[in-house]
Image (cartoon, grey):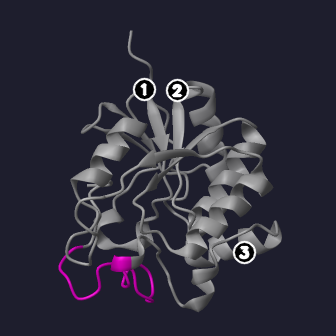
Amino acid sequence: MSVAIPDLETVSAQEVLGYAVERFHPRLKMACSFQKEESVLLHMLTEIEPEPQVFMIDTGVLFAETLETWKRFEERFGVNIEVIDARSPDEPWTMERCCGAAKIDALEQALDDVDAWVTGIRREQAPTRAAAAKLERDDRRGIWKVNPLADWSEKDLWRYIFAHELPYHPLHDQGYGSIGCAPCTRPGAGREGRWAGLDKTECGIHE
């Protein structure tokens, strides 16, 4: 018998996460790129489930500030973040050669044994994300995708971060609206700094 899927569009991010934990944990993982969205999500998630499964994809070319934020997240939230290796030892990452098959393969590895994953996708980030639902089917992988912050604004994020005195990525204070790997990330509002000057808008993970 199929399980009825609730309409989560009118409920809070905490309620979306609560539903996800109740239905999917422990076969639930959160993707973490150490951006402001994850500051909020990790705080909310650990208040609901103290031992969540959280993973990050290490391309080997992350900003030094990202590595520092990783340590601060683990200390503040009391979690051990699983590292999925997507380094490219044979050919260096560049602006043009970034976020390719190695990163997608790493994501598939991370999600191989789960029924759902949590992301920091927000609708206002980019036109490619404008239709994101708070709970949607990830048909590519045959699992559920949970986007608790889909309807949050930039102001909503910062209001929450400051209210709870949460750690956050320091490059946000230097004009980086979105932060990925060092070779393909520049300062810019929203996702303007990602692959600046190229037609590329997504890394492939959320396509």
Identify the element where label 1 is drawn.
Answer: loop
Rendering coords of residue 105 (x, y %)? 28, 44
Which amino acid, mark 3?
Answer: Arg
Residue 146 is situated, as x and y percent measured from the top left of the image, at: 48, 44
User: Looking at this view, is 72 or 159 the one in front?
Assistant: 72
Give the left or right position of residue 7, taking residue 102 as reference: right
Residue type at mark 2: give it.
Arg
Residue 12 shows in this picture: no
Please name the residue shown 27% across and 69% down the image: 92
Q: Residue furthest top?
A: 1
Q: What element carries label 2?
A: loop
Residue with the mark numbered 2: 27
Q: Which of 16 and 138 is in front in this view?
A: 138
The CA span between labels 2 and 1 is: 7 Å
Q: Are marks 2 and 1 in contact (CB under 8 Å)?
A: yes
Left or right of 125 in this view: 13: right
Magenta-highlighted residues: 183-200
Q: Which of marks 2 and 1 is nearer the N terminus?
A: 2
